[in-house]
Image (cartoon, helix red, strand yellow):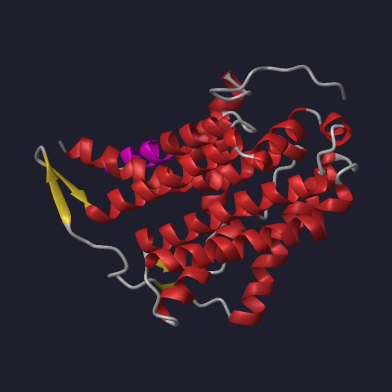
Amino acid sequence: MEWLQQIINGISLGSIYALIALGYTMVYGIIKLINFAHGEVFMIGAFTGFVAIVHFELSFVPALIIAMFTCSVVGVLIERIAYKRLRESTRIAALITAIGMSLFIQYLFIYFRGAEPEAYPQDVLPERTLDIFGVKVSMQALLILFISIVLMILLQFIVQKTKIGRAMRAVSYDKDAARLMGINVDNTISATFAIGSALAGAAGVIFGIYYTKIDPLMGLIPGLKAFVAAVLGGIGIIPGAMVGGFILGIVETLVSAAGFSLFRDAAAFIILILILLFRPAGIFGKNTKEKV
């Protein structure tokens, strides 16, 4: 029964990775860019939620909405300032710019705010435990999982059923053809950054509630792990990012439960090495030939 409890905890953790990974995979699917500044958007979401809850005394849901809105604006600004002019450049130029933007946001944040960590209040979500068939499950973990799944379902609805979602899929398939069909490619790319960044902001608030401690450099490791989750599922494929996040969260939790907690971070990168060796396209990806 203890293993079942650990799996539930792993699914809750995986839902956080999945929310961040969705931003990576959406941006890559549209413009073939690995947005390494995405982890810093996640960090900004965590601090925005903290300020809303602690300083403005808001409850969880309003704080979550404010963090998502703030991060969507930040995501659009990053795209317009750093990436828009590089769309026709080489991929290595865009990749270096993304790494530079990540470091710039980290240290700009530290310059204005300082590097001191903060701690979320303990009572933001109920801390009761439920006894389900002999397994004690945290109410907080269940609520986090529920909120994450609702956001993922909402994303699927936006992508599959709305006008902007159809535009995103068209631009992802063929940007030039989409432009000829009257789709505003610039606005579609900005909308993709806004939606992906909003999900990262939600993940930041959920992460802060789940782990309590947040700091200006907190986006680095979760951001890299979410990238691993996106690659594991098949980068550019939205369901793949979700599945990859859940698998990564479960593996990490089981590694810790087995007594190897010092290796939980290494587990993510071992998975990355294995997936690149044996299935580079990811679980849901298909191998495609590309001209170079």
Q: Quick check: 236 above or below 100?
A: above
Q: Is residue 264 visible?
A: no
Q: Is residue 44 visible?
A: yes
Q: Quadrant of residue 50?
A: bottom left
Q: Nearer the viewer, residue 87 or 63?
A: 63
Quadrant location, the C terminus: top right
Q: Residue at x 67, y 55 (%)?
A: 37
Q: Quick check: 152 above or below 286?
A: below
Q: Nearer the viewer, residue 217 or 259?
A: 217
Question: How many marks on residues?
Answer: 0
Quadrant location, the N terminus: top left
Q: Position of residue 108 (x, y in %)?
A: 69, 73
Q: Is residue 256 magenta?
A: yes
Q: Position of residue 89 (x, y in %)?
A: 90, 43
SS assignment for the magenta stretch, majority = helix
Q: Position of residue 185 (x, y in %)?
A: 81, 43
Q: Position of residue 264 (x, y in %)?
A: 41, 44
Please give left or right for residue 170 compared with residue 10 in the image: right
Please give left or right for residue 99 compared with residue 215 in the image: right
Q: Residue at x 11, y 46 (%)?
A: 131
Q: Residue at x 54, y 26 (%)?
A: 274
Q: Nearer the viewer, residue 202 or 162?
A: 162
Residue range corresponding to the magenta coloring: 249-258
Q: Quadrant of residue 57?
A: bottom left
Q: Residue at x 77, y 35 (%)?
A: 171
Q: Is residue 44 magenta?
A: no
Please give left or right for residue 75 compared with residue 53 in the image: right
Q: Quick check: 240 above or below 9?
A: above
